Amino acid sequence: MKSIVLALSTLLFATLTASAQTPSWSPPPDNQRCPSRWGAADERGAANHVTPQSVLNALKLVKTGEMIELAHVLNNQMPFSGTRRFDLHVKVPNPVPGTNNRVTNEEVVTSEIGQVGTQFDGFGHQSHAGSHYNCFKTSEIVTRSGFTKLGVHNVGTLIARAVLIDVAGYKGVDMLGDNYEITLDDIEGSVKKQNITFERGDAIIIHTGWGKLWGKQNARYQKTNPGLGVPAAQWLIAKDPLLLGADNAPVEVSPNPDRSLNLPVHQLALVIHGVHLLENLKLDELVARNVSEFALVLQPMKMQGATGSTVAPVALR
């Protein structure tokens, strides 16, 4: 009897171990994804889609001149991931000479300014075992003062057609549930309902409703979130976009339902396909106005060698 129990236990352990060692998705090896389709030296990825003609096409969407801001305000009441922080200290002004009594005010900011608030992920931000987009190796491009390749300062101004996929609206809720994985069926259903078409170089934005928690329930906002699953993200990336964005912290579902994976869509987009991520967007006004297509304008800060940038994108209509 003991031998039977032992045999069953061994079989169960082997089965569980095998299952744990077979993740639902794995990054392809370097020799299957490099060089990039834009060449072995390319650092821009999908930003190569932004051309004078694509900018003109995007600006044709502007009919009224209305501007809708899509960024949250930076302050110390924001949700933060891990040990990230944002501390702004006003410098006490010193007396300056002159009969006009001029006083100058400044501030010192202590923060991971590339990775707080509404933020844009550059290609230095993520890797697969130390190998980034286009197979640049961390060990070869990182220095104390920034990356020598893939720095966010290379991105420049992005003006593109954008589409807003309202998955929460499609599901008939104001906000998707904690840790809800957006499926391919959800995306296809939302796209059909909103009559959305895709063009190469689009900025594809996902509305989950999670942004309603921003600054109100920060602990819940950061603990988990609804977002794209790998199959849905793969389908969207096949549309050849400039970027994927959402009103949550990682764009993708977190934690992933496959607990052996950690933010796989970050690798799928940034590392494998050179598609940027735009996180923590403020989408409530766009949704309230039923906007599904607009011109998006944003520019990362010119931080030499940085992995990302706080941004303040604007939707133009």
Image (cartoon, rainbow, N blue to C red):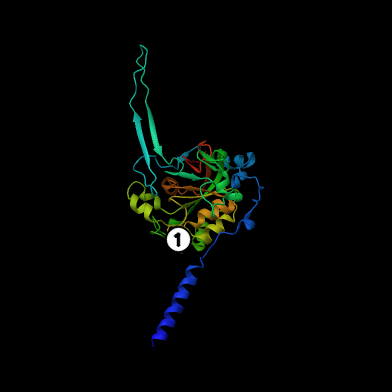
Which residue is the extreme one toward the front?
Answer: 3
Residue pointed to by mark 1:
256
Q: Position of residue 317 (x, y in %)?
A: 51, 41
Q: Where on the picture, by quarter, is residue 4?
A: bottom left
| 24, above or below 36, in the image | below
Q: Is residue 148 left or right of residue 11?
A: right
Q: Position of residue 316 (x, y in %)?
A: 51, 40
| 194, above or below 92, in the image | below
Q: Where on the picture, by quarter, is residue 149?
A: top right
Q: Position of residue 166 (x, y in %)?
A: 46, 54
Q: Nearer the viewer, residue 208 or 229?
A: 229
| 201, above or below 171, in the image | above
| 100, above or below 48, in the image | above
Residue 233, visible in the rendered structure: yes
Image quarter in which the N terminus is found:
bottom left
Task: Name the amino acid type tagged 1.
Answer: Asn
Q: Nearer the viewer, residue 21 or 274?
A: 21
